[in-house]
Image: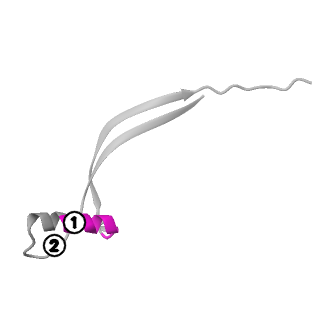
Amino acid sequence: MRVIVTVVDKITSEAHLNIPDGLSESAIKQHITDLYNSGEMLIDLNIAQVEFESISAQIISEHSFTKSA
């Protein structure tokens, strides 16, 4: 018997960033978005928390067919 198990987790990551001084709130959001979209922030992301959301299983039936002569 084969079973496909799907686990859904909610992962919370955090990064400690240096943001230039004097930026407005919208400029800070844009700066963070730009860092994330460019991939620069990905190396700084550390998993801070993992929450279990759900688990499911799908049973796959396998049929054996024999060839008769």
Residue under label 1 = 32
**Coordinates of residue 34 in the picture (x, y in percent):** 26, 67
Placement of 31 over or under 54, stated as above or below: below
Coloring basis for residues: one colour
Q: Residue 24 magenta-drawn?
A: no
Q: Look at the numbered discs 2 and 1 and tell me whether their residues touch, using CB distance below 8 Å.
A: yes
Residue that badge 2 annotates: 19
Q: Residues within 10 Å of mark 2 (few under 14, many from 20)?
A: few
Quarter of the image with the C terminus in it: top right
68, above or below 28, in the image: above
Who's the residue at 37% across and 40% down the image? 8
- Amino acid marked by disc 2: Ile
Residue 29: % across, % down: 17, 63
Label 2 SS: loop
Question: Is residue 32 in the magenta section?
Answer: yes
Q: Which residues are magenta?
A: 30-40
Tell me the element at label 1.
Answer: helix
Question: Which quadrant holds residue 28?
Answer: bottom left
Measuring 10% from the left and 72% from the top, which residue is drawn there?
A: 23
Q: Residues within 10 Å of mark 1 (few under 14, many from 20)?
A: some
Of the residues under marks 2 and 1, which one precedes in the sequence?
Answer: 2
Residue at figure coordinates x 44%, y 37% from the top left: 6
Distance between mark 2 and mark 1 Cα atoms: 8 Å
Q: Quadrant of residue 3?
A: top right
Specify the quadrant of the image occupied by residue 43. bottom left
Residue at screen point 31% across, 39% down: 52
**Which amino acid type corresponds to the residue marked 1 in the rendered image?**
Ile
